[in-house]
Amino acid sequence: MLRLIAAPALAPLADRLADTLAGPRDDPFTPDWVAVPTAGMRGWLRLHLARRLGAGEGPGATDGVTAHVAMPFPGALLHAVVDAEQLDLARHRPPGAVEAEAFDPWRLEHLVWSVLEVVHGAGGDARLGTLTRLPDGATRFGQARRLADLFDRYAVHRPEMVLAWGAGHDVDPQGAPLDPAVAWQPHLWRLVRERIGHPSLPERLPALLDRVRRGDLAVPALPERLSVFGLATLPGGAAFLDLVEALAATREVGAYLLDPSPAASARVRAEVLGQLPLGGRRARLDDRSAAVVQHPLVASWTLIRREATVLLADAEARGVPAVEVVDPPAGPTPPPPTLLGRLQADLRADRAPAGDLAPDAADRSIQIHACHGTSRQLEVVRDAVLHLLAADPTLREDDIAIVTPDVARFSPLVDAAFGPPADRAGSGTHHGPPLLRWRVTDRSLRSSYPLLDAVAALIDLVGGRFAASAVLDLCTLAPVRARYGFTDDDLATLAGWASAVHVRWGLDDAHRARWGLPEGFEANTWRAGLDQLLTGV
């Protein structure tokens, strides 16, 4: 059974999910499986479900617990099916061949080695252009890793293009002839495909999903009831929808979709429903859904969501259940009194702005602050949050999200602007604004795991000029300080030594030769600086 549920907000979707999870299941020892798109949404959903699951009776009960619910990312769905395929192949292979072949050679961690071998051995291939020449500071493995990641994302998000490449057609995602500047990509892909000698995932996925639909392929990693929550789009497009549809043939599958404008989606659905093109797939170039959208922000901000609506409408024409909209509007409602409320209502109803709103002078529902720098932006956000909490006793930090396009840029400064989180602050006296309960989510692995950040800094250092500032910055990283026991005084001493002996950059004269300096010119290198220090000793 497949259920597709959409809503313009997450809370109604989470309530419907909670109703499903609260129902009985065949095996109470098997955890429920809810895929979420981001780590931040995972944390929010756990808190929201805890207000419903296992909570006491009566409104306002907050004693619930979210437990026995696995929350992987949506890509785990496809990985579980592919892993089941490899296990099935292993069972039917002759003894002795299992250990060598029972893995997917197109999985990213394996694909990188095939790409590395092909690129490294293609020195005379003119069609690869400059790809065979390694830039200064780069590594063969790093280059192969980026190329393998590119091919892996193509396989997930542009499978039709990959299939065309396999058939010898150099086309872009829209099916148009490929720009000659990137014509090396399909050529390299075909070389890698020949090297692996095994069909790529887009090539074998249709047959694989047919086996899942028929029940011929067991997928032990997936329970009998699974959900996908909070998706604003379909990751991988039609291929993801095919995957969910195939799993729903033998399982109870629920997809909870975030739709910022149900009215716009209804218009797009009505436009494309029943117009299924030949072959059952609609090309991106044939999408004219923008013409039926009325609000300009919906037209410009929801392109990916409209593509998902088109795919869902085409699937509905093929027999997939229609999307159920949670709490659709029952009739005309009075316009909200605030500017933000009016904007939200217009977006959800896909209604073009009338231009007749005269906001009250006291209406602060939308505020724009001009700040002179990153730190000042965070200070203004902190003050705005404190004002909101003081004005509304029912508001909590859990109800507030601060969104930024560059988490890595702002996250190091949050502690200085907001102070330590209130739930982790010590018992000492705090001077300054009231402490807030805050947490930074959706950070990169480098910022979440200090050791990875240190490894990345070391790789950048080895491939660069060994500038004095870069070496000293590496010494200040927490894993390096812990490994060598550097104190603040030690770091100040190291910086003083480097300054006293005038170290600037370069390990020695041979290292500097890569940047065109003459051999024998060793002044201001680390070798010269260490010689001076040792002479002093």
Image: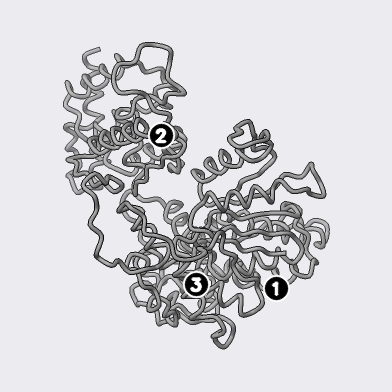
Looking at the image, residue 419 sits to the left or right of residue 519; the answer is right
Where is residue 185 drawn, in percent x and y?
A: 43, 70
Mark 2: few/some/many CA within 10 Å (<14, 14-19, 20+): many
Mark 1: few/some/many CA within 10 Å (<14, 14-19, 20+): few
> Label 3 is placed on what type of residue?
Ala
What residue is shown with label 3?
266
Quadrant of the image containing the C terminus = top left
Asked if 492 appears above or below 58 in the picture, the reply is above
Where is residue 397 drawn, in percent x and y?
A: 43, 34
Asked if 415 appears above or below 409 in the picture, the reply is above
Distance, label 1 to label 2, CA atoms, is: 44 Å
Instruction: Report if the CB atoms under discs 3 and 2 are less than 8 Å apart.
Output: no
User: In this view of the protein, which residue sits in the foreground, 394 or 268?
Assistant: 394
What residue is shown with label 1?
207
Looking at the image, residue 490 sits to the left or right of residue 454; the answer is left
Among the two numbered marks 3 and 2 on one chain, the one whose residue lies closer to the N terminus: 3
Where is residue 430 drawn, in percent x and y?
A: 34, 15
User: In this view of the protein, which residue sits in the foreground, 175 or 315?
Assistant: 315
For label 2, the SS is helix
Using the rendered image of the protein, determine whether residue 413 is visible from the camera's viewpoint: no
Location of residue 178 by image quarter: bottom left
Quadrant of the image containing the N terminus = bottom right
Of circles 3 and 1, which is in front? Answer: 3
User: In this view of the protein, which residue sits in the foreground, 412 or 254?
Assistant: 254
Q: How many marks?
A: 3
User: In this view of the protein, which residue sits in the foreground, 399 or 240?
Assistant: 399
At a point 40% along the width and 34% down the height, the residue shown is 454
What residue is shown with label 2?
454
